[in-house]
């Protein structure tokens, strides 16, 4: 498989890196502290085409490959993981679901607004009582003539309060288990659709996370994605793609933590030397760099397989599992290398250390990734 960097990948990396340094770095801590959603920043990202990265150009997207999108997400995460999460989830979950399973009419109705950033997208699978076991969801949609009536709730939904277009999974047949789940397009403002509590989080604080409540929401029949009963299967496919984004985000966080650690280690002096001269510090840096390179390669491999139209689900789980665990280790070591200063908000590693934990939880925990990988090995 060809994982060589193309000129276009390098050019996109430079655009994203320059944006992150000039537009994100100066404001990252302000948004983190206030937990405010960074609308001005997201508007500028939209102007670069980063809110419709893999959407076709005739639907207003940038027409990039999955590999190019991964490069962009990594660069944004190197400076601000919350913004990278907004970009990754908007592109791969709501928009990704519509691109994969929407009919022509649905794509033309919703993708241009999402790809241009005029509207933000959110995707609702998780419920208060069903996370890893998402097939046990309780939200339900009952048929009513040509329409559906939705009741229930969703929890921890990224872009939950700032979104305008939502893909929501709900049970449409109580007797058919996971085969009784369907996917619907919802729009903010539909009567009975209410945004609930906005979460106050450990990390990723400027990414928007909210509860969604549905009370007798009437959904037009034309908003069903695919056929009734196909929603859970669709969701698993959407998550396969989303995991490449989370892997890229993890690589970016780990790389940001390594960059900050190398710079700090060269500058900080103890025992009459820079701490970068101590082998104990050098070995930490070497381990971080090696693991990050391996995680990046797995991420690019999964993205390249997806772009070629080959099966990529297990490859995405390998990448997400390794990259997220590597990033947790790397940010821990980064704080250690910074000593007490790593515990202080003036240094970027403090924020990386908080943000990174979501990577081993969201879009399937590390345990769920191991279940997927093991199922591939032993069946079942
Ligand atoms: C900031 C944030 C943003 C999110 N964004 C979205 C979003 O946009 N849309 C959405 O639908 N969801 C979203 N989620 C939800 C996220 O995907 C879930 O939190 C995640 O899937 C885990 O579910 P849970 O929290 O219910 O944990 P649980 O499933 O309750 O898991 C608890 C623990 O048990 C472990 N566990 C569970 N089952 C097994 C098993 N069979 N074997 C071994 N261990 C197991 C888990 O790995 C975990 O360690 C978000 C969550 C957060 C925190």
Image: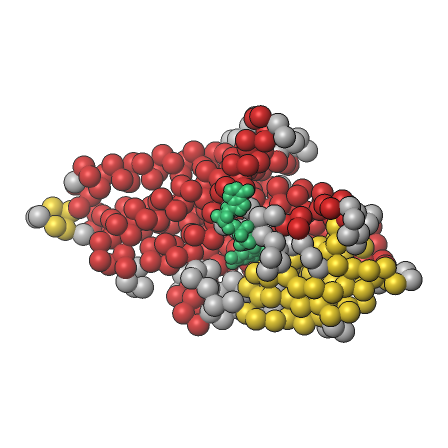
Q: Is residue 317 left or right of residue 220?
A: left
Q: Is residue 8 above or below residue 335?
A: above
The answer to which image quadrant residue 33 occupies is: bottom left
Total tally of numbered discs in the picture: 0
Residue 250 x/y as whole percent: 46, 46
Q: Is residue 89 left or right of residue 296?
A: right
Q: Is residue 41 left or right of residue 237?
A: left
Residue 79 x/y as whole percent: 42, 55
The quadrant of the image that shows the N terminus is: top right
Residue farthest toward the right in the current orientation of the protein = 145
**Can residue 89 be seen in the rendering of this structure?**
no
Residue at 53 percent across and 39 percent down: it is 369
**Can residue 178 be seen in the rendering of this structure?**
yes
Q: Is residue 185 above or below residue 270?
A: below
Q: Is residue 345 above or below residue 296?
A: below
Residue 57 x/y as whole percent: 71, 49
């Amino acid at each position: 498989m060809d994982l060589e960097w193309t000129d276009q990948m390098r050019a996109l990396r430079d655009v994203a890196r320059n944006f992150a340094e000039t537009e994100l770095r100066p404001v990252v801590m302000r948004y983190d502290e206030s937990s405010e959603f960074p609308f001005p920043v997201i508007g500028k990202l939209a102007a670069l085409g980063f809110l419709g990265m893999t959407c076709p150009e005739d639907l207003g997207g940038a027409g990039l490959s999955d590999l190019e999108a991964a490069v962009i997400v990594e660069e944004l995460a190197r400076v601000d993981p919350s913004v990278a999460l907004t970009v990754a989830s908007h592109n791969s979950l709501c928009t990704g679901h519509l691109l994969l399973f929407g009919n022509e009419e649905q794509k033309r109705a919703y993708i241009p607004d999402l790809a241009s950033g005029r509207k933000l997208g959110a995707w609702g699978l998780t419920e208060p009582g069903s996370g890893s076991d998402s097939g046990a969801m309780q939200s339900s949609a009952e048929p009513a003539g040509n329409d559906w009536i939705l009741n229930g709730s969703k929890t921890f939904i990224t872009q939950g309060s700032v979104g305008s277009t939502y893909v929501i999974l709900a049970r449409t047949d109580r007797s058919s288990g996971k085969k009784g789940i369907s996917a619907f397009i919802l729009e903010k403002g539909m009567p009975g659709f209410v945004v609930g509590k906005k979460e106050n989080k450990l990390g990723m604080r400027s990414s928007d996370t909210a509860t969604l409540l549905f009370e007798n929401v009437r959904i037009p029949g034309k908003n069903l994605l695919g056929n009734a009963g196909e929603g859970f299967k669709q969701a698993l496919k959407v998550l396969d793609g989303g995991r490449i984004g989370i892997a890229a985000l993890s690589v970016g966080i780990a790389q940001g933590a390594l960059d900050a650690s190398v710079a700090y280690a060269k500058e900080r002096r103890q025992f009459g030397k820079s701490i970068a001269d101590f082998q104990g510090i050098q070995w930490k840096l070497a381990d971080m760099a090696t693991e990050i390179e391996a995680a990046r390669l797995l991420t690019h491999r999964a993205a390249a397989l997806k772009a070629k139209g080959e099966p990529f689900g297990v490859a995405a789980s390998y990448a997400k599992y390794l990259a997220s665990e590597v990033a947790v280790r790397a940010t821990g070591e980064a704080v250690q290398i910074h000593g007490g200063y790593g515990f202080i908000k003036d240094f970027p590693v403090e924020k990386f250390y908080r943000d990174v934990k979501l990577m081993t939880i969201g879009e399937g925990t590390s345990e769920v990734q191991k279940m997927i990988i093991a199922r591939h090995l032993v069946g079942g």
